[in-house]
Image (cartoon, rainbow, N blue to C red):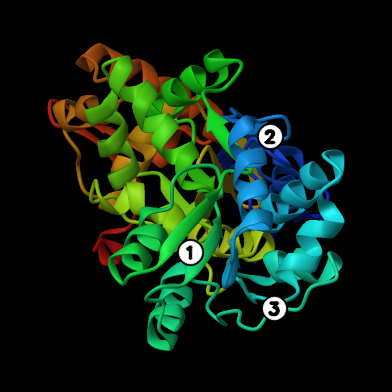
């Protein structure tokens, strides 16, 4: 829900005051634009590079093999991958022979985009799981029997052991189709700076559209000695949203909670991220002054005020128990990177100036600080 600004009567967008890190390599600006439309600030940091295999010997050899040998089924896992395969085949003069071969086999498409790519090529899928889950697609194949069958599986940037291994263990001969692959980002500095922002508390959410991007982020954190700190930040204060269950696996392996839409769509990913961030706002009535704490800003009586990570850290700590005294040492512990008590005093001073109401944050001599909340309102 948007908040109406007290200054000009216009609504404050739901994500104004929140910062989001976008690690996607493909169509990153499109994803970012959806969040910007909701008012968010975006930090772009591609975590991977998308490398097509159009000239690769592996893809050419796999395609030739399907033309030379019997094939019983083909699995399209992504729309962009299947289209890339058809485009590469066209460049080799093999598109029409390949399509003739595939028209006589069972075609499975993992999701709507893959199904659309299959149909655009003039093929008709025989099965596409409603959940868009690779696991459900594998179950369907296993239930129909795969022993002795040759199945082509279009890979999606990396090996697919969850698809390939159970099929092979059940007796299928799997031909892997490596249409594209992932590599480290061309500019690793952007990802490095995003990790810095996560650790200093200036990023509120990280939406992910691929598991390789997550793995690349953690690999950089490991190389730079920040893995534990990044994991702790994602567990405690950063919303991690994933487009689907496969994307969420690297986080689940580290015990990091994630949110995901019911269907694997970018638009749905944005919606679930927005909803989760809005639930993370804190509302307080401090002596008649309305406060709404957002990720990087506070709305004071309808005015959106941007804060620094240090200011927000101490304000959020005070807001955990409105009206109760929070010691200087406890506040120092929540400062980004830790800090001394004199750093708390500096952050409090700047916070009071930012809020424009010095009495909202009260000093309790020799004890600490508290938000000015009437005793009857204290939790």
From the viewer's perspective, is residue 293 above or below residue 42? below
Whole-percent x and y of residue 235? 29, 46
CB under 8 Å between discs 2 and 1:
no
CA separation in Å, label 2 and label 3:
24 Å
For label 1, the residue is 260
CB under 8 Å between discs 2 and 3:
no
Horizontal side, residue 52 vs residue 327: left or right = right
Would you identify the image quadrant in which residue 141 lies? Answer: bottom left
- For the residue pair 352 and 63, the one nearer the viewer reads as 63
SS category of the residue bearing label 3:
loop
CB under 8 Å between discs 1 and 3:
no
SS category of the residue bearing label 2:
strand
Quadrant where the N terminus is found in the figure = bottom right
Whole-percent x and y of residue 112? 69, 71
For label 3, the residue is 125
CA separation in Å, label 2 and label 1:
28 Å
Nearest to N terminus: mark 2 or mark 1? 2
- For the residue pair 294 and 154, the one nearer the viewer reads as 154
Whole-percent x and y of residue 120? 85, 66
Horizontal side, residue 180 vs residue 136: left or right = right
CA separation in Å, label 1 and label 3:
27 Å
Which residue extends farthest front?
68
Q: Residues within 10 Å of mark 3 (few under 14, many from 20)?
A: many
For label 2, the residue is 52
């Amino acid at each position: 829900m948007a908040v109406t600004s007290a200054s000009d009567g216009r609504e404050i967008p739901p994500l104004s005051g929140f910062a989001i890190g976008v690690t996607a390599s493909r169509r990153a600006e499109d994803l970012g634009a959806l969040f910007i439309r909701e008012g968010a600030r975006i930090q772009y940091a591609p975590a991977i590079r998308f490398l097509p295999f159009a000239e690769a010997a592996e893809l050419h050899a796999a395609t030739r093999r399907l033309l030379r040998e019997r094939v019983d089924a083909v699995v399209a896992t992504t729309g962009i991958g299947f289209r890339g395969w058809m485009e590469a085949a066209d460049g080799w003069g093999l598109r029409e022979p390949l399509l003739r071969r595939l028209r006589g086999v069972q075609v499975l498409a993992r999701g709507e985009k893959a199904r659309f790519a299959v149909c655009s090529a003039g093929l008709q899928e025989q099965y596409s799981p409603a959940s868009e889950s690779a696991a459900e697609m594998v179950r369907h194949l296993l239930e129909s029997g795969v022993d002795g069958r040759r199945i082509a599986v279009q890979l999606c940037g990396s090996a697919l052991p969850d698809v390939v291994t159970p099929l092979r263990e059940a007796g299928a001969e799997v031909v892997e189709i490596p249409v594209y692959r992932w590599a480290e980002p061309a500019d690793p500095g952007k990802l490095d700076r995003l990790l810095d922002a996560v650790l200093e508390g200036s990023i509120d959410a990280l939406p992910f559209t691929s598991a390789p991007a997550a793995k690349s982020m953690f690999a950089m954190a490991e190389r730079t000695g920040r893995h534990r700190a990044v994991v702790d930040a994602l567990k405690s204060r950063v919303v991690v949203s994933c487009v689907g269950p496969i994307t969420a696996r690297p986080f689940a392996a580290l015990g990091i909670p994630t949110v995901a839409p019911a269907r694997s769509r970018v638009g749905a990913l944005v919606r679930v991220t927005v909803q989760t961030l809005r639930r993370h706002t804190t509302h307080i009535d401090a002596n008649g002054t309305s406060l709404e704490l957002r990720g990087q800003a506070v709305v004071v009586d309808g005015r959106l005020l941007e804060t620094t990570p240090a200011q927000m850290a101490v304000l959020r700590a005070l807001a955990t128990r409105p009206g109760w005294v929070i010691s200087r040492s406890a506040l120092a512990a929540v400062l980004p990177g830790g800090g001394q008590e004199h750093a708390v005093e500096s952050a409090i001073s700047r916070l009071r100036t930012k809020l424009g109401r010095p009495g909202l944050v009260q000093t309790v001599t020799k004890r600490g600080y508290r938000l000015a909340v009437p005793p009857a309102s204290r939790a």
